[in-house]
Image (cartoon, rainbow, N blue to C red):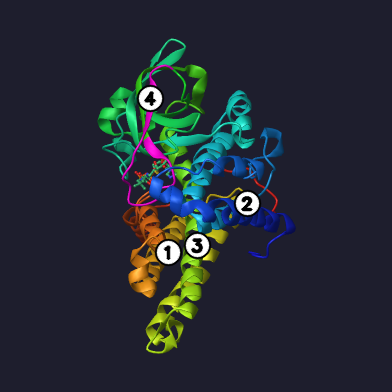
Amino acid sequence: MIDFSLTESQLAVRDMARGVASKIIIPKITEYDRKQEMNPELLPAMKAANLLGFCIPEQYGGLGMDYISLGLACEELEYGDTSARVILSVHIGLFSLPVLTWANEAQKKKYLIPAAKGEKLTTFGLTEPAAGSDAVGIQTTAVKQGDHYIMNGEKMWISLAAVADYFLVFAWTDLEKKKKRDHSGLSAFIVESKWPGVSTGTLHGKLGVRAGNTGYIAFSDVKVPAENLVFKEGAGFKIAMFCLDQGRYTVAAGSCGLIRACRDACVTYSHQRKTFEREIGEHQLVKQMIANMEAAYEYSTPLWMKAGWLKNQGKRSTKETSMAKWIACREAEASAANAVQVFGAYGFSDEYPVERFYRNSKGASIYEGTREIHTLMQADYVLGYRKDRPIEHDLPVVEQG
Ligand code: CAA
């Protein structure tokens, strides 16, 4: 039976993340969003609060917390700003949990332990300039030569590209299968940012998530040791989809934080602002927008918690995670658009946070599976075109809390 009551340790993680949001993120977010830079205090604060590896087992440098805790931390961080939640999405969701699940012991010792301790920052490289939703359309190659692979290609729209130390990179190792778009020719590798031939850069002028680092990673004849191949040749597509099951989960939970931030900002403003000699909260159409935000939060939250509950049991949650991500992002976008409306002209200015919520909300309907990809996936599940089978590896079972 699903039990959504929170344990003491889950509440402690939530409070820790809430503290980082209120003390470190919120006071300076307008400044860093305007500057389009990461707040330099954020990563040290997340590391000090053990937020960079808390749901990795203790033997690999983490705290052994469960996946509901991960969702709670994401919600609290995104309440502060989407850019902070994105750090957990890539560092834990798209790198650490997949490495925990698919990598060998030597790889876990070398790469997962420093990541979980927050000594190294990590990210994920699937998307390319000409391939986003069409994951099999990527062009990066890794050709085997003796005891290493030679990697060439470019990854684009990568969160933390210019600040991460390690990347989980997807590339074709079978060039014949690449021509046929046969996903069993794709493989996954752990690549270090300091290796010769690896270069990175930051993108500016983004619509949202401006206080976060987003960029490209280019590989020019990079010599990747064969020991950095994750699991086995040909498993890359499945590992990438597994990564997205965890990353999308963090986006879903984070989006609930954004909905809550919209609601709270609107409630405060609705009591302060008067029109027609009344608080605007007394006007029925404003009430309707705020009620919709409340409803959105209430029905989006159990969706990610259900996915987290399945993950805690080591059960595949591709469908549930996709549903949670699709609905929470859709509702965050609608809530943020209405929040700007509630604030009227002031919502059009960065004097108030809702314009940032609006800009940030748009990204989540694009990254980690567009709204269209999730719509198609859900239709395919009910039509019987898509069926999930047990996979070779899934998340380790953890005790709730
Ligand atoms: N876990 C494990 N294995 C999985 C899986 C999962 N979640 N999903 C699929 N697989 C396996 C299947 O079992 C199947 O295996 P077999 O061939 O042995 O049967 C294989 O993978 C192929 O699966 P599908 O047939 O389901 O694959 P598909 O071609 O239908 O997938 C798609 C199509 C759903 C559109 C998929 O390509 C997709 O999700 N695309 C979106 C990619 C995406 O979200 N990109 C955003 C990246 S975010 C980013 O890069 C930003 C950043 O900041 C890092």
Q: Are marks 1 and 2 in contact (CB under 8 Å)?
A: no
Q: Which residue is mark 1?
A: 352
Quadrant assignment for ligand 1: top left
Q: Which residue is mark 2?
A: 312
Under mark 4, the amino acid is Ser
Mark 1 vs mark 4, foreground winner is 1
Under mark 2, the amino acid is Asn
Q: Earlier in the sequence, mark 4 or mark 2?
A: 4
* Magenta region, residue range: 196-215
| Residue 199 image label | 4
The percent coordinates of residue 303 (x first, y second) are: 51, 63
Q: Earlier in the sequence, mark 1 or mark 2?
A: 2
The percent coordinates of residue 160 (x first, y second) are: 45, 38
Name the residue rendered at 40%, 31% in the picture: 170
Q: Residue furthest top?
A: 146
The percent coordinates of residue 182 (x first, y second) are: 32, 33
Q: Which residue is mark 3?
A: 256
Q: Nearer the viewer, residue 74 or 263?
A: 263
Q: CA distance from mark 2 to mark 3?
A: 20 Å
In the picture, which quadrant includes the N terminus?
A: bottom right
Q: CA distance from mark 1 to mark 3?
A: 20 Å
* Residue 213, magenta (yes or no): yes
Mark 4 vs mark 3, foreground winner is 4
Which image quarter: residue 347? Answer: bottom left
